Amino acid sequence: MQSLDRLKESPSQTAGPYVHIGLTPNFCGIGGVYERDLGSTMVKGETKGERIELRIRVFDGAGSPLKDALVEIWQADANGLYNSPAELRGTADPNFQGWGRQPTDMETGVCLFQTIKPGRVPFRDARLMAPHISLWIVARGINIGLNTRLYFSDEEKANAEDPILTRIEHRQRVATLIAERQGNTYVFDVHLQGEKETVFFDS
Amino acid sequence: MAEAGSNRVPETGAFFQRDRQWHPPAFTPGYKSSVLRSPQKALLSFDNTLSELTGPVFGHAMLGELDNDLIHNFAKPGESAIGERIIVHGRVLDERGKGVSGVLVEFWQANAGGRYRHKKDGYLAALDPNFGGCGRTITGEDGGYAFRTVRPGPYPWPNGPNDWRPAHIHFSVFGNGFAQRLITQMYFEGDPLIWRCPIVGGIRDKAAIEALIAMLDMQSTIPMDALAYKFDIVLRGRRSTLFENRPEGN
């Protein structure tokens, strides 16, 4: 029999407690190597769209917020276009990369992103997904990066027909993916374990 | 958005399913920090949507001249980091064996004594005033990358009463889609601590552990200057879209 001749993905290993050294060196006091921490500023004056803030915390199974985690987000622009070569539907806002990276605060565990509200992106069929932001979370104790999404509490109608949210079997868990609007801030608590465990993705 | 001036057709097929038996599971009690930080419920599986198939692009313009030289990027002018000088090089590939070009690779590590430049690291080994511990580069056309650094030292860590991390370099890698995002660690050929490490031991398959061990590469050394280690990184592959089901037909 022939061989399929495929490689295996490199196994993941934890980002560890010192992830900041590599990914946000200025944040942890290593200045002068990079001008600024990559992904720390997402929005410029020219960026189109509604300015919003994301206030994210990640809680462990004992209910304590992680103070050594790192969160990355990836999202579409205000018109629902991704700034990526694989986006074939049009050209995204050139003033918005759509990617951000922030550490959780070492004292409070709060992680803040200043961004814009994304537009709707189509699912694999023609249906539209509700506006959402993809999250990727790494930290000491997390062996493989955790993927999930943040949806918006003021998009009830879109959320109700979202092809991902609607396939969550245990309906009470849908709420774990919906950030609560407070003014221009969306508050999103991620729970790694327990009754309120966030729905994490394998996609 | 296709790259301006490029004839390359971007790939848009879904990524191969992740083999979660190959990766360490979330809950590995030998590594105590995972106990309260491991999700316990089933993951929600679905085929990639545009949100996973797309990902950010980073241009070479963002790189500084010393970004891939940890021996000098934090050192005072005319000085350099202390330790065994090494070159780490390899390719970023996908599971089909194709080089993944133009992707950002970031790395960080302890100094030659096993000490990190971080306020949370209280190990008594000395800091090196000329070593910061971070670097980055972007892969070339064939997926190749290289950087210069010093070999990091092993160090003790609070897990068991006498646990030591093998010498390692942390790697963060982007692919072309956000679903390829990966963080891992590179270990060094011949290090006896690899097989005693609870973090490494979270990986169940010996072949998977070996995939993280870089080999000494005498053909890439610089005589009288630096040893070399070769470390390839594999990201999720991509399915072909040639005969994909589409309601409107292909």
Image (spheres, helix red, strand yellow):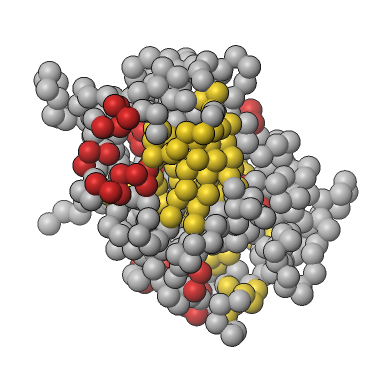
Q: In this figure, what is the number of numbered marks? A: 0
In the image, farthest residue toward the bottom: B161
- x and y percent of residue A145 in the render? 44, 53
The quadrant of the image that shows the N terminus of chain A is: bottom left
- x and y percent of residue A181 in the render? 47, 33
In the rendered structure, the answer to whether residue B90 lies left or right of residue B208 reads: right
Q: Residue A152's image quarter?
A: top left
Seen at 42% across and 58% down, the residue is A192
Q: Is residue A157 visible?
A: yes
Seen at 56% across and 54% down, the residue is A69
Q: Residue B167's image quarter?
A: bottom right
- x and y percent of residue A176 in the render? 37, 47
Seen at 70% across and 64% down, the residue is B120
Q: Residue A165's image quarter?
A: top left
In the rendered structure, the answer to whether residue B196 lies left or right of residue B132 reads: left
In the image, farthest residue toward the front: A182
Q: Is residue B218 visible?
A: no
The quadrant of the image that shows the C terminus of chain A is: top left
Seen at 57% across and 72% down, the residue is B166
Nearer to the camera, B40 or A86: B40
- Residue A172 vs A54, above or below: the answer is below
- x and y percent of residue B141 in the render? 48, 34
Nearer to the camera, A37 or B125: A37
